[in-house]
Amino acid sequence: MKLKTILAATLAAGITSSALAQTTEITITGATAFRQASMQAIYNAYSSVGALGNTFNVCHDFTGNNLSQLIASNKAVFSGTFPGITGTTVIRTSFNGSAEGLNAIAGNNNPTFLQAAALLNTGSIQGSTATPTQTLRPKFSFSDVYQSTTPIDNEVLNPVGASTVGVVTFAMIANEGAPADLTNVTIQQARQLWTSGIQPLSLFTGDPNDTSLVFATGRNDGSGTRAAYLTEWTYGVANLVNQYITTASGNSTAITRITLVPANGLGSGNFTTSGTGNASTLWGNSATGNGGYSSSSALRTVMGLPSTTVDVYNGVDNSPDISAANVLLLTWLSTADSKNAAAAGGKILTYNGVGVTPIDAAGSYLSSGFNEADFKKIASGTYSAWSYQHLYYYGSLTANETTWYDAMKATWIPEGLATTSNGLELGDMAVSRPNDGSPIVAPF
C-alpha cells in the first residue's frame, strides 16, 4: 500500500475515533412545575436509540429506582447516545424554579448538578440522595413565564420571541382534610388570601358555620409557578404576599406546625424553616411572609398531609399565635404535581368555577393526561390557569446544541407532554395569550 493511501486511511480512522469519542454536555435548569414533562422527554429521546443500560444510563436525586421517581426528581444526569448527535451526550438537570433558572443562565447564580461520575452501568434508573454534585453555569432553562415577567434583565436570553415549547397547566389545591363544601376558588378570593395570608373558610364556602382558618402557601419568587399565579390574578408579580410554610418538625405524616415565612427564609426555635432557600430575594424583598417553598416537589408533599392539630407561628415570635387548630392550606400547583398531591390526599378545586382533573395518560384524550372535556376546556380558553412553557438559553449554540434544542422542541417535549398531565402541546391550543396573565384571545 502506498504511503499516501496509508496516511489517508490512518487519518480517516482517527477522525472516526475522535467523532465516536466526542462528548456533548447539555446543562438544564429552571421550572420545577415542568420537570415531569421535560424529564419524560429526555428519557424518551435516549430510549428511542436503545435500551437503558445499553445505550444510556441515568441517575437522579430521589431514592426510587424507577421512572416515576426520575421524572419527579429535582436533579438528574443522563449519559449515552442521544438521537442525531454523534458520540456521547451528557445531560444534567437541576430544577430550581423558572425565574431562578433564568437568573442562573444569565450568569448570576449557578446551581448544583449531579456529577457524571455518579453513573453506574447497571441498566437501571438509579436513585440516590448521596450522589456527588458540582456547581455549573447552565446553558438552558425551562420557564413557566416570559423573561420580561422576571427581574432578570442583565442579559438578553435567546431565542427572543420564539422560546415557547408548550403549555403548562395549573390547578388550585387544598391539602388533605378539605371539607366537601370547599370546591372552588375565585380570583378575588385568591387575591384576598395571598394579601393577608389567612382567611376564614366561610369566605370560600359561603357557610358562616365554617369557622376553620385557611392559610396561603406557595413558592418563593424564584418560581415561575408563583409568577404565573400572581400574574393570572392580576396581583402583581413583584408585590408582597403573605405565605405560610411548614416548620422543620411539621412535615412528616401530618402537618403540626406552620409559620409565616420568616425574613430571609430563616427563623429560630419552633418556627425554624429549612433555610435560605425559602427566601424571596430576586425582586429584592425578603420581608416576613414573602418567602415560600423553593421547590414544587416539597410543596406537593405538604398538600398530601392532614392539618387537624396545628400550631401557627407569625415568623417572628417563638410562641404560637394559634395552638392546636384545625386548619387548611391552599396553593396553586402544576396539574402534574396536583395529580400526585391528590393521590396522597389533597383536593383539587375548580378555579373561577371551571375545573380540570389530571388523570393517567392511559385512556386519556389524545394521551394528554386529561379527559376530552377537560382537554377542550384548556384548549378553548374556558380554563385559564395556564401559561406558556419556554426553553431559553444564553449566547449562541454549537451545532450539537442546536440539534438537541430543535429535537426537544419539535419531537421530545410534545411526547413528554402527551404522557405526564403537565399541559398541552402548542398545536393543541385554539387560543393564545400575548403575555403572562393577559386575557386569552380566540381567533375569529
Image: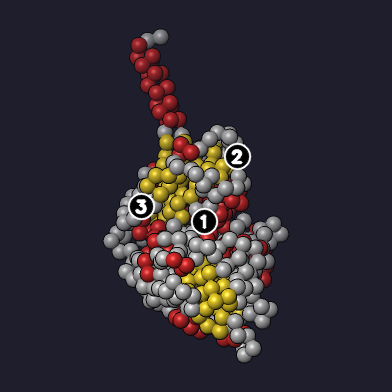
Name the outermost residue toward the bottom. 208
26 vs 331, left or right, is: left
- Tell me where residue 358 sits by quadrant: bottom right
Q: Whole-percent x and y of residue 400?
A: 41, 42
Is the residue under label 3 in contact with that under label 1 (CB below 8 Å)?
Answer: no
- Res. 124 mark: 2
Name the outermost residue toward the top. 1
Point 45% across, 64% down: residue: 273
Q: Judge whether 117 appears above or below 366 on screen.
A: above
Q: Which three-letter amino acid code belongs to the residue tagged 2?
A: Ser
Q: How many marks?
A: 3
Q: Judge whether 188 appears above or below 95 on screen.
A: below
Give the alpha-carbon distance from disc 3 to disc 2, as whole Å. Answer: 29 Å
Badge 1: few (under 14), some or many (20 or more) residues near its Cα, within 10 Å?
many
Q: Judge whether 411 appears above or below 248 on screen.
A: above
Point 57% across, 68% down: residue: 256
Badge 3: few (under 14), some or many (20 or more) residues near its Cα, within 10 Å?
some
Q: Whole-percent x and y of residue 193?
A: 50, 80
- Residue behind mark 1: 35
- Residue behind mark 3: 110
Position of the N terminus by quadrant: top left
Of mark 1 and mark 3, the one earlier in the sequence is: 1
Badge 2: few (under 14), some or many (20 or more) residues near its Cα, within 10 Å?
some
- Of badges 1 and 3, nearer the viewer stands 3
Examine the rendering and report whether any part of residue 214 can be seen.
yes
Closer to the camera, 122 or 23?
A: 122
Point 53% across, 44% down: residue: 128
Tag 3's secondary structure? loop
